[in-house]
Amino acid sequence: MQVITDLDTFLKPKISIVTQGTFDGLHVGHRQILGKIVELAKQQKGKSILVTFHPHPRHVIYKSENNIKLLTTFGEKVKLLTEIGLDYLVVLPFDETLSKMHAMNFVRDILVEKIGVNTMIVGYDHRFGRNREGSLDDLKEYAEIYGFEVNEIPAHDVDEAIVSSTKIRNSLLCGDVESAAKFLGRAYSLTGRVVHGRKLGKTIGYPTANLFLEDSDKLIPGNGIYAVNVSYNEKEYGGMLSIGNNPTIAKAVWSIEVNIFDFDKDIYGKEITIYFKKHLREEVKFGSIEDLIIQLKADEIEVRDILRNYGVN
């Protein structure tokens, strides 16, 4: 897959099968649409193209609030789209000028003139242009004017229970990583760098890797204890992860920490990826460190049982 960030140097394919949107999360509904454009492009010996935006439009339109967290970083999105088999990812720099572009101008000046759209495939609720003014009916009208086709994927073909990035965000914030995985079609993940913490875990028999996320816009699931897979150096390990304030530990600060099972490598400064499997419990303030250790031992037994069901030892 080629990533295009400058449309002035983009050579329009003879046949362009296109969809457009932010596609945050690349959930199962998104994959239905992308699968269609990849399939149709192969049938017509053309190219499949996703037109998307960076940064996320809400970071520009509602920049005073800037409260939206993303399900996929740009790097994660590129990796997932490559796996799907997309030919081109066209990334439009989203700024105030683009945010004010009328729907018809967006179709004419970008989709037609710059990309050369032959067929546009969109979901049943597709909106585009300034203030999301453009509807599916508008797109069909413009298609007649500018000579391209529009194929709509109806709701029942996307999913019986309508999937949305907002629904997935809400599930994750509640710790419901299993529902999020169902909507995404894969386990939700965080990738970060291992940094030094207070090393208290090692003193109680449960050393942890503290995770630092480079991308501050990435959504972090709600506080609690989770059963997870940990990917490091192309190998996978089981583990139990804590997100939160470590209330039993004096002067503790909020952190993301993972105890990796059967693992003793020095990975400070290295990158690891966490795959969320199940929310185990909420954070609890225990009466003593001894009580915390007892709970951690029980957590480990439960997490190992959970992970066996996912094929992780």
Image (spheres, rainbow, N blue to C red):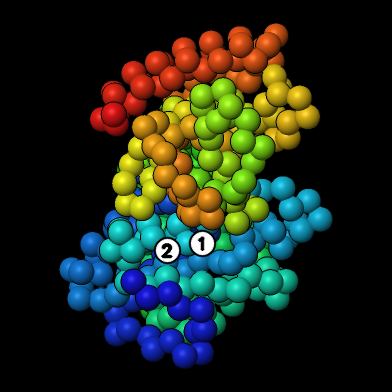
Q: Is residue 30 left or right of residue 13?
A: right
Task: Say which of 172 and 106 sits in front.
Answer: 172
Q: Is residue 9 visible?
A: yes
**Residue drawn at (61%, 11%), measured in percent from left and top?**
290
Farthest residue, direction right? 64
Which residue does the image show at 81% across and 55% down from the upper left? 64
Number of on-image labels:
2
Tag 2 near tag 1, CB within 8 Å: yes
Vertical comparison of 119 with 167: above or below = below
Query: Looking at the picture, how far across and down is residue 161, in whole percent?
Result: 42, 32
Q: Residue at x 32, y 84 (%)?
A: 13
Which quadrant of the structure image shows residue 84?
Answer: bottom left
Give the side of residue 173 with respect to residue 49, left or right.
right
Q: Is residue 177 visible?
A: no
Find residue 106 and name its label.
none
Q: CA distance from mark 2 to mark 1?
A: 6 Å
Instruction: Residue 135 in the image: state x and y as whole percent.
Output: 54, 58
Mark 1 nearby-residue class (10 Å; few <14, some 14–19, many ≥20) = some
Most foreground residue, 82 or 209: 209
Q: Residue at x 45, y 78 (%)?
A: 4
Q: Can you identify the residue that label 1 sits on?
A: 74
Q: Which residue is mark 2?
A: 78
As drawn, the residue found furthest toward the front would be 203
Does dot 2 land on a helix, a strand or a loop?
helix
Q: Which residue type carries mark 2? A: Val
Indicate the amino acid at tag 1.
Phe
- Where is residue 3? Give x, y as percent: 43, 74
Query: Where residue 193 sits: x, y (%)?
Result: 54, 52
Relative to 7, does residue 52 appear above or below in the rendering?
A: above
